């Protein structure tokens, strides 16, 4: 017998015969459903106002009340709820009327426990499928609206992403920081056949090699000091679904062979446990680093790179998809004014021109932050230039020769500005007069 939980199904029994309510209740509770009862029409309708039900067994003969009227009110109050009419043999005609009025099915009394159980299981399956469909439609709407774009460069990336989403190919998502790599990974998972399974994200820079191994693959109890309980690991959680390795460039070099083996053979061992386990996981990875340069430097394994980048998607920087800036700004504004209950409704002409013309080195993340701040400080309906603070932040970032700053701070600011203005890392390296691997090292050193 399962424990009764709302997840299994919430059922309302409506009958004016106490004995029937009792027997039905026992039978359905034994199946693990959560059951409530009502012995009159007003009680039934009151129950619907207090709780959400997935299914109702409704006897149409309820004292003086007309069961068909009750059904009509139920359809208005809880249109998602499946209603099964329970009727005497002599009143089957009314049950047919009830089905025309929206009931899902009917049972003829006396009905045995098997019939009741079967009916409940069938109706709840339909209800759960409808709920799942609703959730999926919501996700699809969400993914569409979040990632819609009018920029040819971005549309091309989205087209490829949709096409490859349904395959099991590993995908490497490249792009500057803040371009929406995490957002795209979530959308790909949502478009894939694994959408109803988990997407598990690991943020690689946050973990050392040892911690990463046990986080990824799990560990046995006592495997190391402090391992007081066994854990299953993220790979296990992602079984059947997607594992998203964010900032893969920071994945510990020492652990890369184990990740490679897992990707190749889908096999792994927990730390401190020799049993070989399997998990069917699709890998998405993202980085803003130049992995090929890292391979050349001996910082990243080439064989792992080739496993990860079966498909590579490169997200354009925001300055290269200017068609989307105002649309994104308006969507962020709508979101934040509603979140913070602020009065702003739009942007004036100067603010629009500034948003459109700015370089956005921090990409969509920076745009989002600018709009969040503007929506909070703007007291009126129109956001203007002063609320955006774009000139101020740009001035602060510009290094001035001879200013009171260290050589290192000057170097960092100059590299950041050149990176923001360059199409590619190679171009930035050429402008700076250094080679790509030196640029890689400097970016790492300065956290750019
Ligand atoms: N198309 C979009 N629509 C709305 N918001 C977006 C979109 N793309 C990204 N964002 C938002 O911008 C911010 C940065 O996105 P995300 O974290 O996906 O970028 P990233 O490229 O993974 O950044 P990093 O490399 O720094 O991890 C997040 O707040 C995200 O919700």
Image (cartoon, grey):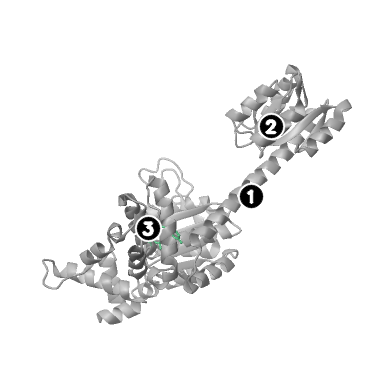
Q: Is residue 382 left or right of residue 279?
A: left
Q: CA distance from mark 2 to mark 3?
A: 45 Å
Label of residue 73 in the image: 2
Residue hosting label 1: 133
For the image shown, how many numbered marks are present on the structure? 3
Q: Can residue 435 be seen here?
A: no
Residue receiving disc 3: 368
In the rendering, at what x and y percent does residue 151 appear?
A: 47, 71
Is the residue at mark 2 in contact range of ligand 1, meaning its CB lies under 8 Å from it? no
Earlier residue among tags 2 and 1: 2
SS at mark 1 in the image: helix
Classify mark 2: helix, strand or loop.
helix
* Foreground: disc 2 or disc 1: 2
Q: Residues within 10 Å of mark 2 (few under 14, many from 20)?
A: few
Disc 2 + disc 1, Cβ < 8 Å:
no
Q: Which mark is residue 98?
A: none
């Amino acid at each position: 017998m399962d424990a009764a939980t709302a997840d299994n199904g919430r059922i309302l029994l409506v009958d004016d015969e106490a004995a029937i309510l009792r027997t039905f209740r026992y039978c359905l509770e034994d199946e693990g459903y959560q059951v409530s009862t009502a012995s009159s029409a007003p009680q039934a309708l009151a129950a619907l106002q207090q709780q959400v039900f997935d299914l109702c067994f409704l006897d149409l003969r309820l004292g003086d009340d007309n069961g068909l009227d009750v059904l009509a009110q139920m359809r208005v109050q809880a249109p998602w709820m499946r209603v099964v009419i329970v009727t005497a043999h002599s009143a089957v005609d009314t049950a047919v009327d009830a089905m025309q009025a929206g009931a899902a099915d009917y049972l003829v009394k006396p009905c045995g426990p098997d019939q009741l159980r079967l009916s409940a299981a069938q109706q709840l399956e339909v209800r759960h499928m409808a709920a799942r469909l609703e959730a999926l439609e919501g996700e699809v709407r969400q993914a569409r609206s979040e990632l819609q774009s009018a920029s040819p460069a971005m549309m091309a990336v989205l087209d490829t992403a949709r096409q490859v989403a349904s395959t099991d190919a590993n995908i490497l998502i490249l792009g500057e920081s803040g371009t929406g790599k995490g957002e795209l990974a979530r959308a790909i998972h949502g478009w894939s056949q694994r959408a109803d399974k988990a997407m598990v994200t690991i943020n690689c820079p946050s973990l050392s090699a040892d911690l990463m191994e046990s986080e990824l693959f799990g560990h046995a109890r006592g495997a190391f000091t402090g391992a007081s309980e066994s854990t299953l690991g993220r790979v296990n959680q992602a079984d059947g679904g997607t594992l998203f390795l964010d900032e893969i460039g920071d994945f510990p070099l020492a652990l890369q062979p184990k990740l490679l083996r897992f990707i190749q053979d889908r096999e792994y061992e927990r730390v401190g446990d020799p049993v070989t386990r399997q998990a069917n996981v699709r890998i998405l990875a993202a980085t803003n680093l130049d992995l090929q340069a890292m391979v050349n430097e001996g910082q990243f394994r080439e064989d792992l790179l080739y496993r990860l980048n079966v498909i590579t998607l490169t997200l354009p920087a925001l300055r290269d998809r200017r068609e989307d800036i105002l649309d994104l700004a308006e969507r962020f504004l709508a979101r934040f004014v509603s979140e913070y209950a602020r009065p702003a409704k739009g942007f004036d002409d100067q603010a629009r021109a500034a948003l459109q013309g700015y370089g956005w080195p921090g990409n969509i993340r920076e745009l989002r932050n600018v709009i969040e701040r503007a929506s909070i400080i703007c007291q009126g309906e129109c956001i203007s230039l002063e609320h955006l603070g774009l000139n101020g932040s740009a001035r602060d970032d510009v290094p001035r020769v001879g200013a009171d700053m260290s050589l290192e701070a000057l170097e960092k600011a100059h590299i950041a500005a050149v990176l923001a203005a360059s199409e590619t890392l190679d171009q930035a390296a050429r402008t700076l007069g250094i080679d790509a691997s030196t640029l890689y090292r400097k970016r790492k050193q300065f956290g750019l």
